[in-house]
């Protein structure tokens, strides 16, 4: 069963505008973590932001914020004041505590294009 | 911040040969490293969890005899693609976590393997 769902294969936004990338997840665990990564065309995976399941406040990191709605099991990424360099693939991921290794399972990704 | 180095970044080999990919944590010790595979325009699929000093744990459907993993030290894990075939051509990316379940996975820059 798919555990991380990103329903937007592609999104575009005008430079300087804000954009929201959707992510929903499925887990029966009470303790879990949610991550967002950016992958530019070069292929590297860049960590953006983390939200723990027990965190009461939404995580923020500079222009990135995570809209965490636990009851709805959603963890949307909000990028404010988009820049041309934000054009990339964005992956939502969930840490699976089972098995003791804290594996990260990724969603299908959303390709963001920032237009000038 | 934590850095993971992956080498080589790009490799072309002939069918039937074996290819070794190295993943090093440069400024931290990683008892656990993860190997992912990514097809073009697709998400990262976890292949295996590499454990220092013990056997790797493979995900369902991943051939352990095909993808040999060795984690001989706290800073080095290797993935060897044995008897490579064109269908093994892909982007392979390793990752490691410094400490704590909330710490992000740090990724290497990936290895693009092309089997001719």
Image (spheres, coloured by chain):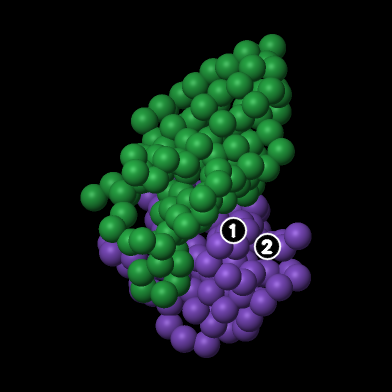
State how far apart marks 2 and 1 are (Cα): 12 Å
Q: Is residue B87 visible?
A: yes
N-terminal of the two: label 2 or label 1?
A: 2
Position of residue A111 relative to residue B10, above or below, is: above
For the point 59% across and 67% down, which residue is it?
B97
Which residue of the protein is positioned furthest toward the left in this rendering?
Answer: A1
Position of residue B100 relative to residue B42, above or below, is: below
Residue B112 image offset from top left, x and y in percent:
56, 49
Colour applied to chain A: green
Which residue of the protein is positioned furthest toward the front in this rendering?
Answer: A56
Q: Secondary structure at mark 1?
A: loop
Question: Do marks 2 and 1 share a subunit?
Answer: yes
Q: Residues within 10 Å of mark 1 (few under 14, many from 20)?
A: many
For the point 52% across and 27% down, which residue is it?
A20
Residue B21 image offset from top left, x and y in percent:
58, 65
The image quarter in which residue B103 lies: bottom right
Disc number for residue B104: 1
Q: Residues within 10 Å of mark 2 (few under 14, many from 20)?
A: many
Residue B5 image offset from top left, x and y in percent:
69, 62
Colour applied to chain B: purple
Label 1 is found on which chain of the structure?
B
Left or right, residue A55 beside residue B107: left
Residue B6 image offset from top left, x and y in percent:
65, 61
- How many marks can you see? 2
Which residue of the protein is positioned furthest toward the bottom in this rendering?
Answer: B53
The image quarter in which residue B59 lies: bottom left
- Is label 2 or label 1 in front? 1
Label 2 is found on which chain of the structure?
B
Residue designated by label 2: B4
The quadrant the C terminus of chain A occupies is top right
């Amino acid at each position: 069963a798919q555990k991380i769902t990103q329903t937007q294969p592609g999104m575009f936004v005008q430079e300087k505008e804000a954009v929201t990338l959707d992510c929903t997840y499925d887990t029966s665990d009470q303790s879990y973590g949610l991550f967002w990564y950016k992958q530019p065309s070069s292929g590297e995976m860049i960590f953006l932001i983390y939200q723990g399941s027990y965190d009461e406040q939404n995580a923020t990191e500079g222009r990135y914020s995570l809209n965490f709605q636990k009851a709805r099991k959603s963890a949307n990424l909000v990028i404010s004041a988009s820049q041309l360099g934000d054009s990339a693939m964005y992956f939502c991921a969930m840490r699976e505590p089972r098995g003791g290794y804290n594996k990260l399972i990724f969603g299908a990704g959303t390709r963001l294009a920032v237009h000038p | 911040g934590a850095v993971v180095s992956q080498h080589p970044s790009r490799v072309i080999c002939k069918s039937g040969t074996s290819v070794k990919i190295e993943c090093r944590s440069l400024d931290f010790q990683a008892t656990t490293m993860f190997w992912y595979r990514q097809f073009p325009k697709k998400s990262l699929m976890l292949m295996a969890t590499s454990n220092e000093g013990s056997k790797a744990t493979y995900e369902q459907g991943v051939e352990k005899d095909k993808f040999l993993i060795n984690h001989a030290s706290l800073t080095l894990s290797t993935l060897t693609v044995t008897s490579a075939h064109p269908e093994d051509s892909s982007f392979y990316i390793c990752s490691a976590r410094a400490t704590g379940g909330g710490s992000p996975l740090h990724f290497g820059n990936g290895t693009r393997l092309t089997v001719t």
